[in-house]
Amino acid sequence: MAGKTIVCRCNDVTVEEIEALIDSGVTDIEEIKRLLRVGMGPCQGRTCIPIVISILARKTGKKPEEIAPPKARVPVRPVRVEVIVGGADE
Amino acid sequence: MSEIPAYLKNGYITPEELFSIIPKPSEERLRKGPVAVPECPQEIPCAPCREICPTGAISMPTPNDLPIVDYDKCIGCSLCVQICPGLAFFMVHYVGDKARITMPHELLPIPERGEEVVLLNRVGEPVGKGKVITVVPREKTKGDTPIITVEVPIELAWEVRAVRVERRG
Amino acid sequence: MVLFEKNYFGSGSTFRCATGIRAQFTDEANIRLMKYSVERWERLEEELGADIGFNQTGYLFLATSEDEVEAFKANIKLQNKFGVPTRLIDMDEAKEIVPILNTEPFLAGAWNPKDAKANPFKTLFAYLRRARELGVDAREHTEVVGLEREGDTITVVKFRSKGKVESVKVDVVLNACNAWAPLINEMAGLKRDLVPIKAYKHQLVKTEPLERGQAEPLVCPPSWNDAYIIQDGEDGGIICGAGIEHEAKSLDDVEPTYDFLRGVLKYAVKIAPPLRYAHIVRQWAGFYAKTPDSNPAIGKLLDNFYIAAGFSGHGFMMAPAVAQAMAELISKGRSRVPLDWEWYDPYRFERGELRSSAFQIG
Amino acid sequence: MRLNEHPVLRFKRGREVTIYFEGQPIKAYEGETIATALHAAGIRVLNYSPNKKRPRGLFCAIGKCSSCLMVVNGIPNVRSCITLVEDGMRIERQHGRAKLPTKVKPPEFKDAKVVKADIIVIGGGPAGLMAAIHASRAGAKVVLIDENPRLGGQLVKQTHKFFGKREQFAGVRGVEIAKILEKELRKSGSVEAFLETSAVGIFQEGEEKLVLAVRKERELIEFRGRAVIVATGAMERMIPFENNDLPGVYGAGAIQTLMNTYGVKPGDRVLIVGAGNVGLILGYQLIQAGVEVKAIVEAMPRIGGYFVHAAKVRRLGVPILTRHTILRAEGNERVERAVIAQLDENWRPIPGTEKTFDVDVIALAVGLRPSIELLHQAGCQIKFVRELGGHVAVRDGWMETTVRGIFVAGDSAGIEEATTAMLEGKIAGIAAALRLGIADESWVEEIERAQRDLDEFRSGPFGRRVAEGIRKALLGGVASE
């Protein structure tokens, strides 16, 4: 298997892809998130966002304290549509 | 940053390092009967040994202080070995040219009394064989941890800290 | 040229939008503007030299009654007149286009295969990159805090960046702040409600990523509270929206609400029953910056102060056409874009001349 | 791969059932998850990733990372690590993004079940249990919800004995503490516990807080109350290294779940990354389960966890390599080898120091971070505090966050110990009852006592760092450096 260092499992985003985007001048975590779709898969950023913050901090010289993580959204874990509408037992 | 103690680089403590932190029981005391020796050189918030000791032999002003055993007050009851959450208490007793080491043993199988076991030092190297002379099974201890006493050559008294049970089958 | 964004680029409403682009409107002005805009969209990837995820996957409106079928027919006639190729389709064809569609509740569909979607993030960044290449000084995390006006001319823009207030002399100012536009108008010494834009919270929910091709077009039965579904052009997650709106408590109020979560999905599973087995991973809100007639305000407010705002949910799709029109108006005084300046006149509210309400979907 | 004997734990398995993996029958037991049963049968690859088609397996084992998505009875995107087996279940590997099944009827719209209480506690670990017990003692009607089938949170996977003082359960194994707390909870008549129930969002509706939750992935429940205590614990960190997504690279917690909850060996030979308490304890637990631990590597120049935990694994022959890191995982579809190297002063691998271990599992014990998703979603102000493990909610001395009526306790307030989690839980539980006007002022003393116990516990070198972090996390507290 080809060697890859994966940051976001949901969308298969690698360290190299994140670094390349930062090098191109995109340094806001919200923009990185949306352009690479890190943190937008079913894990909702739980595994990848802390790594993105550390890469961003290292590349830009910012402190992790200065990088706010993207807002957590409802539902905080995936929920099947049928459960929300209430008919799962049918 | 201060110098990192060797035991935190290696994960084990040599007798020299240990006895630079706590006193070593005298030969006389070691021959008199089993005595508890904690290998607990780091200030962690933990106090059950002091709390369980029936003679108040363990001093520890706050839970974050090191346990210091008053070897004269220690009666060798082994409750501290049974309770210690860090499995860091041992008892040593010199008998003739042997030493009897009491230690926790939370692995399967539990050796039987009289069984010969492989003696392991602090880094898990086999250093010889020794005989198990007592076993306190889990349900009989005060600390939910089985303890065993093995007889080892006296020169290994400060080396052996675990055993491996090898059964052919 | 300086471009100010008080947060990060796209943070207002662009990144929150449902990605749809359509020419299926019900009045001449919007049909003509959007027909032109779609043509711009078709060329945009080439023009910007970037992938923007533009995809002509169509819009499918669904009728639940005979009356609605008749209304669709009238709209189609009007759209066809201006060259928009919408046609009435039966439910067998609809099912072919949307394999997970529930055909049973619907009688017919209004289908325009030229309607489209695009990736708002990629589009915005493609514009941004190109603008910067052309010399635009685009600044994010930089908030405009005041305008200086002499007579009917804005002379200076004051802005705050990293806690420091600075100013820049300007020849022309364009207010493209949509829901926030009244604040900028006020800074220009105009009445806050001269262009009465109100922020309404519109929400979306989205499923986990799914295989593409299951619900590519925007599918909407307007009689079901304007509910719709559309598959994301990137990860295939299905976005669900509806006309369940809340007036925003403030311009920071983008908190999702529970009634929407259940309300929108109630419709979504009726449109596409297989959705019952998909998982929702996100609910979010953005603003429809609405004017009283749901048509934007586009034009001149003062001698050198222009506005393009109040898009009422149609900003993303209209942007290529409106941006071109504004650029041409400002630089040349007129534009090739078939934009009905009178229809969108920002002073129409003050005069009490409301337009027929533009149909507000996605 | 199944454990039948264990020096500490006893495994009770449910009825034997048969599931079908890609058509092949596999033996499983009721009460265990799909991923567990597949693991016991030696199956590691659960799906292939969406873009790069990489093989993926279990990683977190608690339904959070979505690395285990499979197609179950024709339905895609099922998290196999938290879905229980059922007799006759058909399970397939998922290949990338999935198609929804067609020919489906729309579900009926039904109203959600509504449960009302004064205080809603989210999380049934040590903090949540103590919060519920004390809020109830202080007179509140309490609802406790937890995702797992058993109360106790991570305690139920902990075979080691806890530190602290004996009144704080020192010397008692985690698994036993869980049972003691559960008994206490059942004794207090005013707590209703909902298990296998996940909170998915907190909404403010007028004066009321609505905690929306899903029970058994099937039923929607609206918990409505006036105060919420979030005690959702922690989540494991992942680190970047080559092939860090290869099946067999597991979070430490996933291994504990497999081994200590379900009695399934994670593999035969393990390399552990991280010599903090989690890595050290995991090493010891693996040995207890009869698994060989090849080594523990640690990037720092010193062991981060308690020395006594390190000594336990060292004397059983496990090397601990400080100043070493993992470079890559190797293997075709699953971990076959791990390559490590020594680090220089600048954290760069030193060429020529590479070592290869033949292992089938790489366990990541590289730290925990607080699970703050619900707090963040609910609008609580959050702040990055390194000493507490990452982003945490800003709170006051009574554990109330910046959203009035939302409290926090335990690891979700900052990574620490079960002992401190229990004390914080106690504070939060009583404080919530006080804020609602249910408890009388005499309860303030109880809070102060718990605060003194916390201060005492935190007075050592380990606790001082945490205490420093807590000062930063306090409302109006010191700024981050």
Image (cartoon, rainbow, N blue to C red):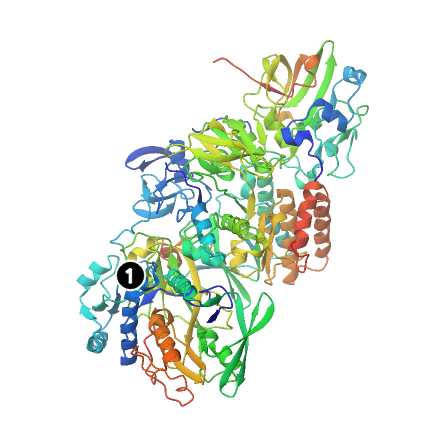
Please say if D181 is above or below C321.
above
Given the current orientation, which residue lies at the most extreme top position?
B97
**In the image, residue C179 lies at what x, y percent?**
45, 74
Chain designation of label 1: C
Q: Is residue D209 left or right of residue C50?
A: right
Q: Is residue B53 left or right of residue A20?
A: right
Q: Is residue C273 left or right of residue D32?
A: left
Which residue lies at the image location 26% right of the left edge and 57% below the top edge?
A: C100
Which residue lies at the image location 59% right of the left edge and 26% below the top edge?
A: B106
Q: Is residue C245 left or right of residue D428?
A: left
**In the image, residue C97 lies at what x, y percent?**
22, 60
Q: Nearer the viewer, residue B61 or D120?
A: B61
**In the image, residue D333 lies at what x, y percent?**
37, 34
Numbered disc total: 1
* Amino acid on which disc 1 is placed: Asn
Q: Quadrant of the N terminus of chain D?
A: top left
Neighbourhood count class around disc 1 (C-alpha, 10 Å): few under 14, some 14–19, many 20 upward: some
Q: Nearer the viewer, residue D139 or B41?
A: B41
Q: Nearer the viewer, residue D361 or D411?
A: D361
Residue D461: name its quadrant.
top right
Please say if B163 is above or below C231.
above
Is residue D400 visible in this depiction of the protein?
A: yes
Q: Nearer the viewer, residue D260 or D48?
A: D48
Please say if D306 is above or below D316.
below
Is residue D266 visible in this depiction of the protein?
A: no
Q: Which residue is mark 1?
A: C55
Query: For numbered disc 1, what is the local secondary structure?
Result: loop
Which residue lies at the image location 38% right of the left edge and 62% below the top edge?
A: C126
**In the image, residue D85 lies at what x, y percent?**
38, 40
Residue B92: name its quadrant.
top right
